[in-house]
Image (spheres, rainbow, N blue to C red):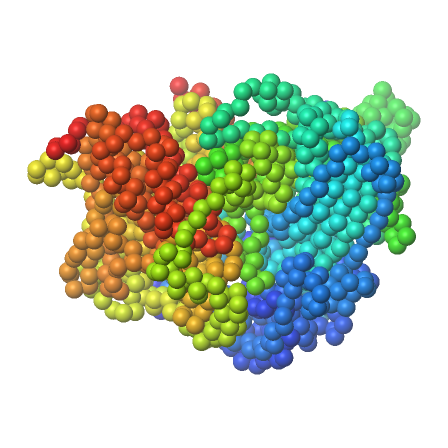
Amino acid sequence: MPQPHTLVVNGETVEVDVAGLPLLADVLRDRLRRTGTKVACGRGECGACTVLVGGRPTMACITPAVLVREPVETVEGLAAESADLRAAFADSGAFQCGFCTPGQVVAATALLRDGLPAADEDRRAHVGHELSGNVCRCTGYQAIVDSVCAVAAARDGVSS
Amino acid sequence: MTWVGRRVRPLDWDDRSAGRTLFTADLGGDHLVGRVLRSPHPYAEIVAIDTARARRMPGVHAVITAADFAPDALYVHRGGPLSDRPPLARGVVRHVGQEVAAVAAETAAQAEAALRAIRVRYRPRPAPLTPTAARAAGAPTLHERTTDEPNVAMLLDMTWGDPDAGRAAAAVTVEGSFAYPSVSHAAMEPNTTLAAWDADHGRVELWTSTQAPWFIAKEVSQLLGLDHDDVVVREGATGGGFGSKSKASEHEVLAAALARAARRPVLLALSREEEFGSNKPRHRFETHLRTHADADGVLRALDAEIDVDNGSYNHMGSSVMRVGVITLGSMYRPDGVRFVSRLVDTATQPGGQFRGYGTPQVSLAMESQVDEIAARLGLDPIAMRLRNLAPEHAETLCGYRVGTNRLGDCLVAVRDGLDWDVARAAARSSGAVRRGWGVAAGSHGSGAYAYEQANRSDAAVDLFADGRVRVRHGGSDAGTGQNTILAQIAADELGVDLGDVAVLSMDSDRTPFELGAWSSRGTHMTGSSVGQASRELADRLRRLAADKLGTSADAVTLRGGRARSDAGDVELGDLVDLSGEAVDGAASEPVLSHETSYLLEGTEMLAPGKDRANLSPSYAFAAHGAVVDVDTRTGQVRVADYLAAHDVGRAINPTAVEGQIVGGAVMGLGAALGEDLVREGGRVVNPTYLHYALPRNADVPSVRAHIVAGHEAAGPYGAKSVGEMSIVPPGAAVANAVADAVGVRIRELPITPDKVITALAEQEGRRRRHGIWRRPSRWWIAAIRALYPLGLHHVLDRWGTRLGAARRARRHDPAPPPEIRMPADLGEALSALRSPRAAALGGGTDQLPDRPRQARPAPVLVAVGTLPELRRIEVHRHEGGGEHLHVGGAVTLAELARHPATPTALAEAVRGIASPQIRNTATVAGNLVQAKRCWFFRNGFDCYKRNGATSPCYAILGDHRFQHAAVDGHRCQAVTPSDVGNVLPALDAVLTLARGDGSRREVGASAFYSGPGETVLRDDEILVAVDVPLPAGRRSAYTKLGLYTGDFATAAAALSVVVGEDGRWHDVRLVLGALAPTPWRLTEVEDALRGTRPTVAGVRRLVDRVLDAHAHPLPRNGWKLDAAAGLCEQAVEEIVTGAAAAVPERPAVTPAGV
Ligand code: FES
Ligand code: FES
């Protein structure tokens, strides 16, 4: 028996059937064809499937869609907001294969919304810690942290 | 404009970073889902397979077994007598996880159900699981091999140069046994294939995650009995390979065979567990090495005996071993080298190709011993290596004809970049955390190891009428930046903008011959072939332009998309039509194509009788320097700084080169410090990111790349390869740094805290005695443990497990998905929970992933995560003064950590749990009630707790170093994993539980757990709130040891004290986590400390005394006692001098009555 449930994905309201307890990642990828959200472990352990739920980074691969009551933002929906971040990623080598990248971009976008600590040293440590849920096997992370810090500095420069 | 040598963005960066690039699993369309049935036994005969029921099941379109392939079908791989692996097990399985059958069904659930319906009868055989066991006299053999020794697939016994002379000249000799672990590539994109069968033409199309499409087509075609050209590989993105995707990885063939059988497209994606547990990891090397040097520190001879763990089948083991041993004769200039090396068959997952290809393994031994010799001779490790440099443009012992060699410059770069001389000479800390500096050098072949046809690479370049250029090659860029480099080359040769160049790769219909991106060939081979094709096309264009402009071709230059000369200019695109050779491309636009074949000369292949060869066109070198901090209290090693200096020739795209250097170095650091595929009975016990300790972002705070710029004449545009080189030195660099820091030499990677603590205890002559004979309460347990190796384990494992509930459940169809109830309030939730079929669901982060392994998962889940009553977090003030923090059970961990009144220890504990994403979802109650900490239990072993009383506890004989109890263990050795659960007893918290009948009760945090991860909650009861007192003057700290950021605690300490104005401690509470089955309060220590002004050393003494009186460790986890005591020291330090001391949680007052 179908069990309708309303989701708001990237600002768009969609009705999905949640009978059988589908996971948010499957709903996004298979039913809504938004395949930017990747699945690398399916157990909530790697961050490839990170999306924002109510603005909070969340592992879509272990979140039953039926429990999602707040707006969902995926990498597709955050492409514009993260344009400077993605360019910084590309400039610094923050991705190679790009499989973890959507998750990194989503998590880092939320981090940048919250703002980073002022001091340089704290910044790197903070970014490293807050992005530790996102495994990257290619880059060794340095360029990811560099990019996020650089974008935060650039955005600060613009706003102040 | 020159593009070669410039930092440029990856070609498709915008799409890739925005998630628009399609990987195989992203391809839509109507396809079936494939699944693989795998062997549960390491070595067994297959007596019968019955697929009849599976074939009849709804939605099932194909079930295949060995019978669906030719009776002699084998993967080719190295060919000849080395080929030994059938596509599906034929009569025998030789490792846990070997493919036995495969199914294709309409949905994943149907495919899973079909797997369970296949009946396989096995007759288990004794299985040799380690090289030692496999080489032992009388060991059961896995294959017929051509060597004289059982289970030895290949044996190399060789001498290069004159080792006798070298030994005779030696003043020092060091000797030791080194082990480099079997590690997993763990590429983020799981291996995935989408296969479509074209019945009309007998062709199969594949979209597959690969580094080498040609090899896939080769194996698929021969195993399916097709022509090579009838297997068409299509272009798609590949999410990381590191070698694992450079040869066939079984899923390609199985997907193709399923698609043919089902006559429908089939998508077969490996799960993460399959990636870790069944795919082909790095070969473990056990290297016994003797290094001889003269009094000047010049290496004179090396003697090695090496066992390479081949696993159950030959893949590239023979060549991995050859490349590995070459390390001994390729970098320095000893008089001679002698080695005996064996490729040993074991009944474990077969080893495969892995970045570095044997070199990191042997390098660990050699570069560790260089340091040991330097220490013996009182030489600086960098100075010692500088004395041993081999000359440039010379031949090495192993037959390499090395061109440029900038190893010396790399070493100097490390010395300068780490301020080596000054920093090392400065006074060393004598405190608990010691710093050490280590260096290691390395070399690796660059630009294709010689292999059949490996010296050839074809490429094509197309010019379209609108001036766009397209490079076509048959390789695949799995993330190395190869496509971008090729575009840079074409742009330069043709004088066009990089933005006008596209790259088409992989597609075997539309690209010319190329073996693919493996063995460091990407840059060299395709760089050369694309360069050559572009140059030849440029020549043609110059001639065409010359004809049109009425000048000579020599007078024409290509620049800015135009052919220019004194006689005038012409757009390149306009030359397409003029050529008269233009053909219509796919979109029927005219295109001028030029294809060429590049042939590499001067390399040689190894062959029988030829054991020295110039395998590669050029050779890469590197030196890495590591700065580590070793915490002598916990054994933890942290990399504080790391510099990787590389001789790369000329960097075509420096950003990509640095990316390969840093990425490879960090992967190497993973193997140095945490990664290891741990097996029990041949089965991997850590097949998940949760249990496989690879580096997370915060674990590698500073890793820097340094490019030693140069020019290698043999390489395209002066370039050498870099992707493999970078993973070679980290193991020895870290081991050397640890030795420098604390004076102990660890020879087996990974250097985990257990090894450090154990070595330190040995160095200091410390030994704990537990006097079990004086403690009758432990006699029964001690007796059972003693019986395990004497046959009890075997009996329980082999027969006892058959009686268990989990085992029985797996014979039935998988449980249907649960029904979810969404109650409006707590009352409704509680009454729903009265049904015995119902269970509460909070964030679900722990419970839902575990469901597939549960024998009887709850059919109904009651969602309690949003109930308002459970979502409150607030400070309550008591009437008589005082206050406490009230935390609803469904408050998330992130919310708890953020609340200003949350005590330091609690906030600190939460900060270290899992990941920010999990902390945003997981609830406080869920964290407290999560399943036990044990990798056997969590990964579905049929253990005592999962399967029932007749099953063994796998931890008793298995790897229990990190996760199991060292105090009070009973039948199950697991511990309670909750960090929150460790802290709450220290904070004297009270838990409120509510039942379906509306009744409530309060339980002190110390009394909440009844066993490992087991609580006093009744079936219909849930945890509704936690109340944490907030006494004035309290300070608290939580210290934890894990293997990576976000790991569960291997050991933890929670300390809470009320400090009076006089500095005396009152109301002391100390809890050790992950040491005993439940959080363990050290009341004896608390009593002794009350009213005193403790010192760190004083607390340590008290804690040690209590530990010694209570501990009953397993054979390999006694070190956790030291670590736990060390964590107590850290916690005391934080309260006395650290951050917790500076900021008391509440204003300090002397409590009444003191
Ligand atoms: S795929 Fe969701 S966390 Fe790994
Ligand atoms: S870029 Fe490949 S995993 Fe991160």
**Rendering coords of residue B411 (x, y %):** 70, 26
Residue B463: percent from left, percent from top: 76, 39
> Quadrant location of the N terminus of chain B?
top right
Q: Residue at x 21, y 53 (%)?
A: B1003
Where residue B854 sits: x, y (%)? Answer: 41, 65
Residue B708 can be seen in this image = no
Q: Is residue A61 placed above or below B896 in the rendered structure?
A: below
Residue located at (85% from left, 26% from top)? B556
Q: Quadrant of residue B489?
A: top right
Q: Is residue B997 left or right of residue B495?
A: left
Instruction: Report which quarter residue B951 is drawn in.
Output: bottom left
Outermost residue toward the front?
B774
Residue at image position (58%, 44%) is B750
Give the camera-side residue of B392 and B166. Answer: B166
Q: Say if residue B188 shows up in the picture.
A: yes
- Residue B736 sits in which quadrant? top right
**B1089 sits left or right of B978 in the view:** left
In the image, is residue B679 above or below residue B516?
below
- Which residue occupies 17% across, 29% down? B1150
Q: Position of residue B513 (x, y in %)?
A: 80, 50
Looking at the image, the residue that sits furthest to the left is B880
**Number of numbered callouts drawn:** 0
- Give B730 or B289, whichever is nearer the viewer: B289
Residue placed most toward the observer, B676 or B1078: B1078
Q: Is residue B20 left or right of residue B943?
A: right
What is the quadrant of the C terminus of chain B in the image? top left
- Depth check, front residue: B1052 or B1047: B1052
